[in-house]
Image: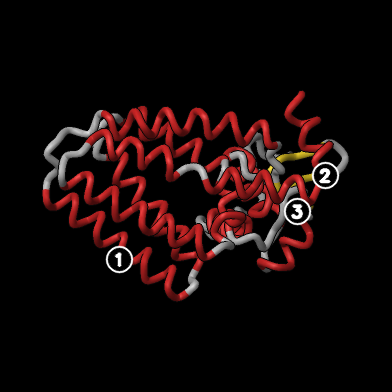
Amino acid sequence: MAKAHQKVRQAPVVSREPGAADLIARRIEEDIVLGRRHPRERLIEQDLCDLFQTHRGDVRLALFELERKGLIERIPNRGAMVRALTPREVREIYTVREELEAMAVRTIPFPVAAKQIQRLEELQRQHTDAVAKGDLLTVFYSNLRFHQVLFGLSGNACLIETIDLLARKVHGIRFYANAFPDSLDRARLDHLEMISALRGARRDDLIALTRRHLKPSPEAYIRAYQLRFGKATAELGDAD
């Protein structure tokens, strides 16, 4: 007679590297930022498994994270691909970004502590050095951190989070401006002027610089979009 209670044999738990999906997502995001992966380029799961020497579970988690950030999209029957923002979408995002970022610098309490200004100067030295070396990945991260610290001075957590969310949605278009040395140098000079405006408590100048600083990336992306997909396609996207 069989025992009333028997141990149920459970399947072994497969341990996974906890940060694998995060690392894959970061690598793909960096490829998008640096222009190594282009709008509408397909992201095939098996190819990514081979590239990163991992299994589909981690790749799918990475793609889910990138989709959440707005960097890729999933098309029925086609799979995942790098998101191609239309000119209209880019203009809408940047219109909102401009107002939110202007709001952030408008609400920074003056005077700004010397320690905070020194932190911005340190980040800007990293940015300047990366521009001189042509190290676009460090340019991207040092620029990103510079603005996070700058807007963080507002102390408004909700505003800071929203600015960061919108900035991530357009990470994929930064390459189009960063590919031109003049644009990189302009960004560098803008940062130095922002620091000067902070130090001198010149709020109106800081707001104007913040608005101006956002212009090159969408302009460069829209020009590239029109060249690649045709002006008619770009105008159709604007009409949707």
Q: Position of residue 204 (x, y in %)?
A: 27, 33
Residue 29 seen by the camera? no
Please name the amino acid that badge 1 sits on: Arg
**Toward the viewer: 208 or 3?**
208
3 and 1 marks in contact (CB < 8 Å): no
Task: Return the residue at label 1.
Answer: 125
Q: Secondary structure at mark 2?
A: loop
Front-most of 42 and 132? 132
- Mark 2 vs mark 3: give the one in front: 2
Q: Name the mark nearer the viewer: 2 or 1.
A: 2
Left or right placement of residue 225 versus residue 95 in this view: right
Earlier-in-chain disc, 2 versus 3? 3
With respect to residue 45, does 88 lie above or below? above
Of pointers 3 and 1, the one earlier in the residue sequence:
3
Camera-near label (3 vs 1) is: 1
Mark 1 lies on a secondary structure that is helix
